[in-house]
Image: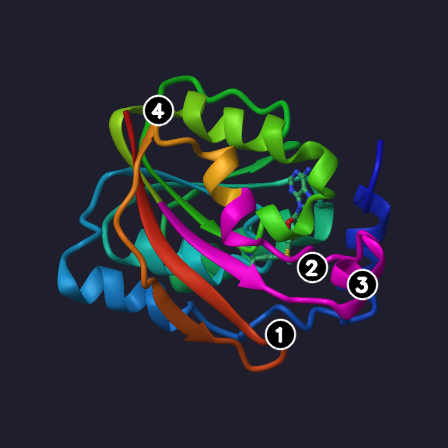
Amino acid sequence: MTGPTRAFWQERFDTEQTGWDRGGPSPQLNAWLDSGVLQPCRIAVPGCGNGWEVAELAARGFDVTGIDYTEAAVARTRALCAERGFQAHVVQADVLTFQPDAPYDAVYEQTCLCALHPDHWVTYAGQLHTWLKPGGRLHALLMQRVRPEASEQGLIEGPPYHCDINAVRALFPATRWQWTKPPYIKVPHPSLSHELALTLDRL
Ligand SMILES: C[S@@+](CC[C@H](N)C(=O)[O-])C[C@H]1O[C@@H](n2cnc3c(N)ncnc32)[C@H](O)[C@@H]1O
């Protein structure tokens, strides 16, 4: 399979090279929650990492499922939820093949797309469409990591792979997803440039 492997991610956790990790839930998740844009529902968090967002959603009454194929991520998310006394489903699975028992009302995608090699983006976008029920909402934080090697020589560098908004537009076409108009919210990241935050409604 092209791109990072499960062993790659496991090693990142084992050696504490988790520069993406904020050490707590994303401020944008809290903003969506506090404003009522995101309300308790059945929600999936693909590529949940250390599980901060899974634990926050569980704390706020969501029926939340964290999905990650790396053993360390699953163990850490389960431990965090158990330590805080929150109920969450935490599934060890590949987001490219995982199929839920029933569709979700929402998906919270935070830097999972940028963790996947672009060869897998079409499959991943198709998965998110399948997971969501019609009218369901995708809350996405898209990592912006422009690399000179990419624009000058066409090299595909990552992770994190730069989630160019034009590519995302093609992956989630307006025939299948309801878009809001730009500009989108810029969410600073302590170690990785910034993310663009937007919501897409599944048609
Ligand atoms: C950059 S980290 C982001 C973690 C978390 N979303 C965050 O923002 O803190 C990417 C996560 O996606 C997971 N991941 C990468 N490819 C995956 C795949 N094909 N299936 C499931 N999980 C995957 C990794 O194990 C890792 O935990």
For label 4, count other residues whose C-alpha is less than 10 Å away and answer few (under 14), some (14-19) or many (20+). Answer: few
Of the residues tagged 3 and 2, which is closer to the observer?
Answer: 3
- Say few, some or many: other residues with alpha carbon within 10 Å of mark 3 (under 14 / 14 to 19 / 20 or more): few
The magenta region covers 139-167
Alpha carbon separation for disc pair 3 and 2:
18 Å
- Nearer-N-terminus badge (3/2): 3
| Residue 174 falls in image quadrant | top left
Q: CA distance from mark 2 to mark 1?
A: 9 Å
Image position, residue 82 (x, y; %) = 46, 55
Please say if the residues under marks 2 and 1 sit with CB atoms less than 8 Å apart. yes
- Three-letter amino acid code at disc 1? Leu
Quadrant in which residue 137 is drawn: top left
The answer to whether marks 1 and 4 mark residues whose Cβ atoms lie closer than 8 Å is no
Disc 2 under 8 Å from ligand 1? The reply is yes
Label located before the other in sequence (1 or 3): 3
Label 3 to label 4: alpha-carbon separation: 32 Å
Q: Earlier in the sequence, mark 2 or mark 1?
A: 2
Q: Name the residue beneath numbered marker 4.
A: 175
Considering the image in quadrants, where does the C terminus appear? top left
Q: Which residue is mark 3?
A: 152
Q: Is residue 102 above or below residue 69?
A: above
Mark 1 and mark 4 lie on one chain; the one further toward the N terminus is 4
Numbered mark located on residue 160 in the image: 2
Q: CA distance from mark 2 to mark 4?
A: 28 Å
Q: Which one is closest to the eye, mark 3 or mark 4? A: 3
User: Which residue position holds label 1?
Assistant: 192
**Identity of the amino acid at label 3?**
Glu
Badge nearest the viewer, 2 or 4: 4
Q: Work out whether residue 156 or residue 35 is closer to the camera in this orientation and state it.
A: 156
Secondary structure at badge 4 equals loop
Residue at x 42%, y 68% (from the top left corner): 25
